[in-house]
Image (cartoon, helix red, strand yellow):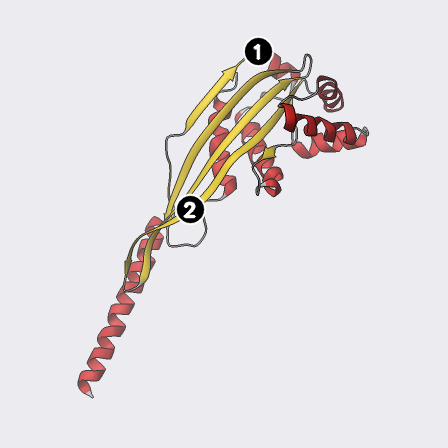
């Protein structure tokens, strides 16, 4: 009976120690987040800093890979927040404001047709772009494209069957095109791919908002 009690007490102590180590590891690693070196490509075609500040920029509906269509609004919101923070010199119209202006002026059908044509040609109709620019009072129109978004989880090691450390990884590929409504041309474009890893015991992944904002900081830093 005594031996049985000792074994039971020892088991409790080992389990308690494992839980304590588990909690300590979680506290120490909960905020250990790192971003791998991002891959960024930009092409400045005909966008001058002075013109961008004077003309202003309005966001139009983003495009996304299949399965991420519901994230369009969140994508535009997260990106716009960073742009407003890093470039207070620019007049920026967020996506909800753009959509409201388009709807108020009765341009919904033309706007939808513009995107249907874009899916086939990769070109936004110049006349519709000019109408959108007219109702938003912004010369430049920005469109985001979510090319890829992936979340993964990988266990590092365990103790007594308990998960001690897990690496959560999110990868994103994001594109930004800025169109000049005056002549219907692409004035600037950039592409950015990055991976953010988070070591933790928690179940949550690196949020889409977090990785979009990291990508936005890098792309915005390359704007004229």
Q: Which residue has dot 2 on it?
A: 152
Image height check: is 89 above or below 5? above
Towards the viewer: 1 or 157: 157
Instruction: From the viewer's perspective, tell me whether residue 105 is left or right of residue 159.
Output: right
Instruction: Looking at the image, tell me whether mark 1 or mark 2 is earlier in sequence order.
Output: 1
Viewport quadrant of the N terminus: bottom left
Q: To which residue does mark 1 refer?
A: 46
Q: Is residue 184 above or below residue 28?
A: above
Q: CA distance from mark 1 to mark 2?
A: 39 Å
Left or right of 202 on screen, residue 65? right
Furthest residue toward bottom: 1
**Location of residue 107 in the rendering, given as x and y in whole percent from the top left corner:** 79, 28
Foreground: disc 1 or disc 2: 2
Q: Position of residue 93 (x, y in %)?
A: 66, 27
Residue reaching furthest to the front:
120
Which mark is on residue 190? Answer: none
- Residue at screen point 69% across, 13% down: 182
For the question of whether residue 59 can be seen, the reply is no
Question: Dot 2: few (<14), some (14–19), or many (≥20) neighbours within 10 Å?
Answer: few
- Answer few, some or many: residues within 10 Å of disc 1's Cα (few below 14, many 20 plus, some between 14 and 19): few
Q: How many marks?
A: 2
CB under 8 Å between discs 1 and 2: no
């Amino acid at each position: 009976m005594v031996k049985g009690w000792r074994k039971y007490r020892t088991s409790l102590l080992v389990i308690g120690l494992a839980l304590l180590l588990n909690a300590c590891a979680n506290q120490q690693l909960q905020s250990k987040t790192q971003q791998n070196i991002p891959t960024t490509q930009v092409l400045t075609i005909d966008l001058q800093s002075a013109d961008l500040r004077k003309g202003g920029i309005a966001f139009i509906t983003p495009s996304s890979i299949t399965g991420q269509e519901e994230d369009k609004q969140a994508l535009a919101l997260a990106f716009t927040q960073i742009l407003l923070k890093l470039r207070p010199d620019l007049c920026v119209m967020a996506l909800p404001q753009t959509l409201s202006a388009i709807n108020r002026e009765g341009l919904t059908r033309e706007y939808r047709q513009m995107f249907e044509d874009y899916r086939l040609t990769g070109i936004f109709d110049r006349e519709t772009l000019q109408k959108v620019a007219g109702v938003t009072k912004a010369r430049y129109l920005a469109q985001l494209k979510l090319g890829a978004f992936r979340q993964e989880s990988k266990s590092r090691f365990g103790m007594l069957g308990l998960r001690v450390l897990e690496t959560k990884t999110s990868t994103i590929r994001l594109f930004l095109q800025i169109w000049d409504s005056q002549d219907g041309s692409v004035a600037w474009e950039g592409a950015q791919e990055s991976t953010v890893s988070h070591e933790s015991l928690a179940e949550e992944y690196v949020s889409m908002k977090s990785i979009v904002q990291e990508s936005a900081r890098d792309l915005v830093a390359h704007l004229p």
